[in-house]
């Protein structure tokens, strides 16, 4: 059986490559392959960390990535995206992160031998 651990959720810039000057993130607004915004849920007043945490807590099918924006007068906007993100377009104050599918996250949990097999090995 597999160890019952909370899966590690990993994020990367869309397309897997950071935009220059982004500090490892894609500076700008998230976009889909057609250059569109895609489908997303919008939340206000969440910090970047809270936005990431909210996305990570959802199933992969409900949050494939997030965009966090710092707007005028200190407002924050969080978009939890539902469609595959391929790139970011330059938008000051915004960052885009794509969720790495769980099947691609390493290290993967190591399957444990059933208790009966472990006992017979002693």
Image (cartoon, grey):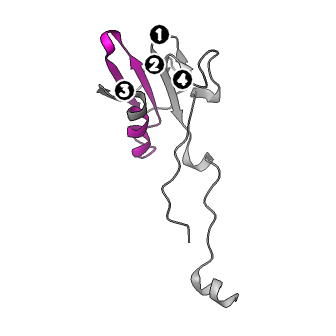
Q: Which mark is residue 78?
A: 3
- Tell me, for residue 92, which label it has, or none: 1
Q: Nearer the viewer, mark 2 or mark 3?
A: 3
Pointer 4 residue: 33
Disc 2: which residue: 36
Q: Are marks 2 and 1 in contact (CB under 8 Å)?
A: no
Horizontal and vertical percent position of residue 7: 51, 53
Q: Earlier in the sequence, mark 2 or mark 3?
A: 2
Which region shows up in magenta? Answer: 51-80
- CA distance for labels 3 and 4: 21 Å
- Nearer the viewer's eye, disc 2 or disc 1? 1
Q: Residue furthest front?
A: 74
Residue located 63% across and 76% down the image: 113
Q: Earlier in the sequence, mark 2 or mark 1?
A: 2
User: Is residue 92 inside the magenta stretch?
Assistant: no
Kind of element beneath mark 2: loop
Q: Nearer the viewer, mark 4 or mark 1?
A: 1
User: Spatial distance from mark 2 to mark 1, Cα to Cα?
Assistant: 18 Å
Q: Quadrant of the C terminus?
A: bottom right
Q: Secondary structure at mark 4?
A: loop
Residue 22 on image: x %, y %: 59, 18
Left or right of 71, for residue 97: right
- The Cα atoms of the two marked residues, 2 and 3, are separated by 17 Å
Residue 100 x %, y %: 56, 40
Q: Residue at x 55, y 48 (%)?
A: 102
Q: Is residue 10 left or right of residue 37?
A: right
Q: Which structural element holds mark 1?
A: loop
Other residues around mark 4 within 10 Å, as few (<14) / some (14–19) / many (≥20): few
């Amino acid at each position: 059986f597999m160890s019952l651990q909370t899966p590690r959720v990993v994020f990367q810039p869309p397309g897997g490559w950071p935009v220059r000057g982004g500090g490892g993130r894609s500076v700008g607004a998230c976009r889909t392959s057609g250059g569109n915004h895609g489908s997303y849920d919008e939340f206000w007043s969440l910090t970047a960390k809270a936005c990431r945490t909210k996305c990570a807590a959802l199933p992969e099918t409900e949050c494939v990535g997030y965009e966090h924006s710092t707007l005028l007068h200190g407002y924050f906007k969080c978009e939890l995206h539902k469609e595959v993100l391929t790139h970011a377009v330059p938008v000051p104050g915004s960052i885009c992160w794509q969720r790495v599918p769980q099947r691609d996250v390493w290290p993967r949990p190591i399957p444990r031998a059933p208790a009966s097999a472990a006992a017979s090995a002693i």
